[in-house]
Image: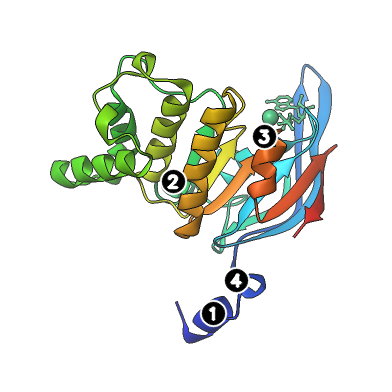
Amino acid sequence: MTMIDDTAVAAGEGAAQPIFRLAGVTRTYTQKGRVVNALTGVDLEIAAGDFVAIQGPTGGGKSTLLQLLGALDRPSTGSILLDGTDIASASNVELGRLRAHELGFVFQGFNLIPTLTAHENVDMALEPLGLPAQERAARVGEALERVGLADRTDHRPGELSGGQQQRVAIARAIVKRPRVLLADEPTGNLDESMRDEILAVLEELNAEGLTLVVVTHDSAVAKRARRRLRLEKGVVRELTR
Ligand code: ADP
Ligand code: MG
């Protein structure tokens, strides 16, 4: 980081460097001859260290946007700069590197492998990093501890509550020490107390500097975000800042 960047960050939230910079982003799907404009021209900056909630009706384009931010997909037109790398034009190898190192993903359905323990599920995310076994084990232990599951490392998903399963999924997303955590309806399958568990973990990670982008229908989750966006018919609108 240069002196100028340090000054900008120190000057406060508004001056923080954007980690994402989207310009003119569209995403069009064509399925069975039918064309769907899921995103119709999104211009957006997301500051490093921010906690952004994205709300809006089903079909509004929320998951599409999150997949683009996560380098799981490319826009039809426009550019998505992640720390200066354009997801639209980067090579597949570079996108793979971003996903393995910089971007953590959490989904509504947890997406854990039922036959693996919590430790093994989290460890999977480290496979592409090529770390020595000892460091790998230490990192997995640390990630599970950070989500409050140090005493559940040998449990399989079926032996854990929904909230605990989602915490394993969060540990799997953060074990690679990403700069951004993207979550699509992370509390959608959880009751209120489990939702609060997840919120507490997310807020703690954000306080430590992790950038959070969370798609949610749950206004209790959105209320805790620093910035709220609404995505409807492929268009982003700022709700609060
Ligand atoms: P949200 O997450 O807000 O519910 P999505 O991003 O999932 O919205 O979907 C936006 C629009 O794009 C919807 O009309 C949806 O049907 C369509 N869509 C999403 N993914 C695909 C796909 N893989 N193929 C075709 N259409 C899709
Ligand atoms: Mg969705």
Q: How far apart are marks 3 and 2 (CA)?
A: 23 Å
Residue receiving disc 4 = 16
Q: What SS does tag 2 mark?
A: helix
Indicate if the residue with disc 3 has its beta carbon within 8 Å of ligand 2.
yes
Compared to residue 18, the image places residue 140 above or below, namely above
Q: Earlier in the sequence, mark 1 or mark 4?
A: 1
The quadrant of the rendering that contains the N terminus is bottom left
Marks 1/3: CA–CA distance: 33 Å
Furthest residue in direction left, as rendered:
134
Answer few, some or many: residues within 10 Å of disc 1's Cα (few below 14, many 20 plus, some between 14 and 19): few
Side of 211 where 112 appears, left or right: left
Give 100 or 86, whichever is nearer the viewer.
100
Residue beneath label 1, please?
Answer: 10
Residue at the image position 54 percent from the left and 79 percent from the top: 10
Give the residue type at disc 1: Ala
CB atoms at circles 3 and 2 under 8 Å apart? no
Q: Do the residues labelled 4 and 3 touch (CB within 8 Å)?
A: no
Which mark is in front, 4 or 3? 4
Element at badge 4? loop
For disc 3, the neighbor class at 10 Å (few under 14, some 14 to 19, many from 20) is some
SS label for mark 3: helix
What residue does disc 2 label?
A: 93
| Residue 104 at x, y percent in the picture | 47, 43
Quick check: which quadrant has ligand 1?
top right
Q: Position of residue 176 (x, y in %)?
A: 36, 46
Q: Distance between the residues labelled 4 and 3?
A: 26 Å
Whole-angstrom CA distance, mark 1 to mark 2, is: 34 Å
Q: Report the residue marked by disc 3.
A: 63
